[in-house]
Amino acid sequence: MATLARLQARSTFLVHQYYFRNSAVDVFRKKEYDAAVKIQSWFRGCQIRAYLRYLHRVATVIQKCWRGYLGRQHYQLIVKLEFCTMKMNLYNAMAVRIQKRWRGYRIRKYCFNYFYLKEYLKAVSETNDAIRYCYQGFAILDELCDHTAWRLKRKNTTLFPVYSMLNTSSHQMCGFSMPGNLRHQEALEEFAEMKEREEKKADLEREEKKRDYQARKMHYLLSTKQIPGIYNSPFRKDPDPWELRLQKAKPLISQRPKVKQKRDVNISNQLACTSARSLPQSEILPPIDRKQCQGPFRDITEVLEQRYKPLEPTLWMAEPINELKMAREELRKQEWMRNINDNMFLPFSSYHKNKKYIPLMHSSSKYGPNSYGSQHFRDENPKKWICDKDFQTVLPSFDLFSKYGKLYSKAGQII
Amino acid sequence: MSLLRPLLLDVVPTIQQTAALALGRLANYNGDLAEAVVKGDILPQLVYSLAEQNRFYKKAAAFVLRAVGKHSPQLAQAIVDCGALDTLVICLEDFDPGVKEAAAWALGYIARHNAELSQAVVDAGAVPLLVLCIQEPEIALKRIAASALSDISKHSPELAQTVVDVGAIAHLAQMILNPDSKLKRQVLSALSQIAKHSVDLAEMVVEAEIFPVVLTCLKDKDDYVKKNASTLIREIAKHTPELSQLIVNTGGVAAVTDCIGSCKGNIRLPGIMMLGYVAAHSENLAMAVIVSKAVPQLSVCLSEEPEDHIKAAAAWALGQIGRHTPEHARAVAVTNTLPVLLSLYMSTESSEDLQTKSKKAIKSILQKCTYLPALEPFLYDAPPNILKHVVGQFSKVLPYDSKARRLFVTSGGLKKVQEIKAGPGSLLQEYINSINSCYPEEIVRYYSPGYSDALLQRVDSYQPLAN
């Protein structure tokens, strides 16, 4: 019982202790709980991390292998490409070398040969010198032409870039001197000789003329019968050639300057010309007293009359041939000048004649009256005509009596 | 006229002949008198009696026809309409050379005017007879026949072909060697009229082996022979490069150059044109022309000739020579012709033609010229459109040549270039910039205008450091 009392006395303390201890434990409970949780979470974390590490390692290995595989493939591709490129570059470089050499060779040999050009120009200037200075020696010139042509032919090339197609041109150019060569040379030599001869002749002639002129000036030095001249010395066997020249020479007369007479344009002279008196009128001089020549000669006055008879044209000649037409034209012009009104005066009876004339069907064509049958009646050929004018209807005059009594001869005259 | 006409019908033959002679002299003097002769209906009478009378009358009648036909195409047409051609052709067959000469002369004068009249003469069958006349021994007849052939063939290629078909070229070519100078004139003129129409005809003339004989004619004493010979060579050279090559190979260029040097005035003109044509075909031919020393001769022509058309031809020829490559341009520039060309272009007295040609020549030479001493004078007095090209050439040469750069500076060229005012962005400005870029900046600034003023301004505005 005592213990009970003691326990009952301690019961409230127990309750309080019990409550206090529970609550005190509660305080720590959270803490311990948290701690336990923490430890456990940490441990679990470690576990999981280890597991993750393991997984990482495995994944890394797989990825490593796979990437290596891919990379190696890629690398092989690159290497292949590089190799191909390197090969192509090498080929290109070699091809460039070959082409370089070939192009240079081709241009130099076939298209433009610089040295050939130089030689050609030299040949041209040599030919030019030949033309310029060897005027007499045409043969040399011809040779040089040949030489140029031969040089052109020898190269067997076409000439210049522009004419690279014209292989035949060199042949054409050589052709000019080949066939007619000899003829050329001969002709040119002949020509040179002819020229020389001409020049010599001209020189000689000039000399002759000069000597002749001198001889004419010195004609007074000619020897006479009494006095021998300078060139005819008595101590000589035969006279000097100048003597003979002097004998042949005419004395030189100083020339008076010729005054050109201007024909005076006198109107009266002109009128005299156009009149009937167109032949010279000379006054008949009084005859010298001399015997009449024997024979059936006419009287001198008659002869002189006939000789100086002025022109007496017949009427036909004197007037122009179409004078009638011209006179009509003249009259017409005068009337036209005088008339006030140009219209013809029509009679009143034709005032109402205003019907149009209908021609026959036979004489008209589709487009109007046919001109054959009314305008022309013949077949004409204009190409055969000598000139394009029609015949003039002119009545010829007959000059039966125009010369009556005017003839010189006495034939047919009534004596 | 009314008095002379009836005399033609006179009984006495001497009177007829004298009347015809009188008519001929009248018609010869003046065109109006010739018209009066035609209007007087004298021609049919003459033509009719030409066929029957003796040779003196024929000569006189042919003289009348010639005298009438020479004045104008209408009068010649009147003669053709009278049917004179047939009778003249019959006269060409006569024995007497005087008659043939008169008939050939008349035909030549008729054919001279235009192509239809020439065709009428050819249709009358005159050409073979003329070629026969050429072969006769009388020189006067040969001359006249050659001149008639020349007049016929000058109008058109067909007429020239007709003349060639009869075989005229061979005979004409043989007569080049004849010493008579008037004959040579006519023969060369006939050959050049034939050769001018087409390449084939020119080749046929060349095949007759006239080269190098024609070159001797270039040295003849007679001026007109020289002129006609150089005309012939020109007509041949202008067609194709091969023909020009042929002429160069035979030394034709040197002969023509000498010929140009020895005569004056219009005689020179065909020779100058021939050089231009040869040089125009290709650069190698132009080089051959240069090698033959033609350029100094041409520049002499350019400066001393008084007439504008000859100067224009010389300028054109120089332009053709110098336009191919820098070598050619240098050869032309060295002879100091460029300032002459420039002065001709700028002078107001030169004709339009001369100005255009000299401008073209300057432009074409300048575009290839790299010879700087010749270009420098241009910087000073050229007009702006030419200055552009000059500066362009400088800008092409200076970047690569140090000596030239130095020379350019010392001769004052750089200074002049700075003074040129050019619109920004224009071609001239680009060229100026490229020239400036060849030099260090200080030098460019030194020579730019107004640099001394700029320096002085800097002096004014400079504050010395206060110690």
Image (cartoon, coloured by chain):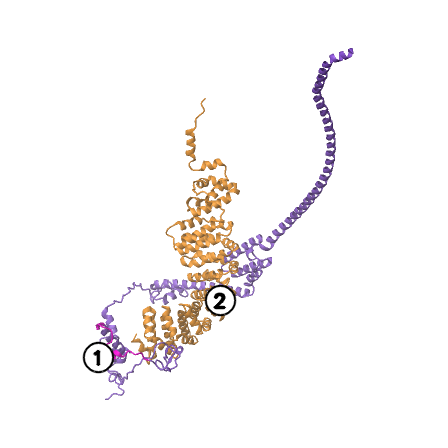
> Type of residue at label 1?
Asp
Amino acid carrying label 2: it is Ala
| Mark 1 chain | A
Residue with the most extreme front position: A1
* Residue at position x 34%, y 69% in the image: B28
Chain letter, orange in picture: B
Task: Kindly report which numbered mark, 2 or 1, lies closer to the viewer in this rendering.
Answer: 2
Kind of element beneath mark 2: helix
Marks 2 and 1, how far apart at CA: 72 Å
Colour of chain A in the image: purple
Q: What is the magenta segment's predominant secondary structure?
A: loop
In the image, which residues are magenta? A337-357
Q: Chain of mark 2?
A: B
Asked whether residue B144 appears in the rendered view, the answer is: no
Front residue (pair A345, A204): A345
Query: Disc 2 designates what residue?
Result: B173
Indicate yes or no whether the magenta region holds residue B447: no
Relative horizontal placement of residue A111, taking residue A208 as reference (left or right): right
